[in-house]
Amino acid sequence: MPVLIEIADAVVAELNAATFSVPLAAVRGYRPVFELGEMTALHVSVVPHGQSSKALDRNRDSFDYSVDVAVQQKVEPTNATLDALMMLVEEIADHFRRKALPGFPAAKCVEVKNDPVYSLDHLEEFRQFTSVLTLTFRVWR
């Protein structure tokens, strides 16, 4: 199995084993797109994003593997509802920051991106909260 997929699966396992302020059930996929009617339930999707490498020395390379964690739900756009989902996104980011993955201990999270913090277009057009975290894990081999 490709390393990027192994890391994505380890992220799913870690998300599902953790306790957050909002209960979640993460799944890995390639396309976090759902029918709008399905979006009343919280969806947390882990999607392979990218990989890069650079030489460390004559015998080893440093590989960076990125996965996206999408948090999506159709909501009433009140401050309280959006604040709770923003808190969940922050909790997920904090959970992985500078951490090795228990399911793939050679991979350590070296970068967390969340820009933009949510999709204003999705909120206005679909009344759907969508936030995507990009987690980058470094592996030396």
Image (cartoon, helix red, strand yellow):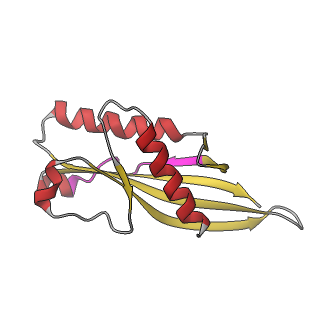
Bounds of the magenta span? 110-121
* Quarter of the figure with residue 19: top left
Examine the structure image and report whether residue 123 is included in the region drawn in magenta: no
Using the image, determine if residue 32 lies above or below residue 20.
below
> Left of 48 or right of it: where is 120?
left
Residue 103 vs residue 118, the one in the foreground: 103
- Identified at 53% across, 64% down, the residue is 5
Instruction: Inspect the magenta stretch and tell me whether residue 119 lies in it.
Output: yes
Q: Position of residue 46 (x, y in %)?
A: 41, 57
Q: Residue furthest right?
A: 58
Q: Position of residue 48 (x, y in %)?
A: 47, 64
Which sits in the foreground, 76 or 40? 40
Query: Which sits in the foreground, 111 or 106?
Result: 106
Q: Position of residue 28 (x, y in %)?
A: 40, 59
Quadrant placement of the C terminus:
bottom right
Task: Tell me if residue 137 comes above or below residue 14 in the rendering.
Answer: below
Where the N terminus falls, by quadrant? Answer: bottom right
Residue 67 appears in the figure: yes
Number of numbered markers: 0
Q: Is residue 125 visible?
A: no
Task: Report the residue at 44% width, 35% height from top.
Answer: 18
- Give the left or right position of residue 102, taking residue 54 as reference: left
Residue 58 position, x and y percent, is 89, 67
Residue beneath the point at 36% across and 50% down: 26
Residue found 49% across the figure and 43% down from its top: 14
Q: Is residue 14 left or right of residue 122?
A: right
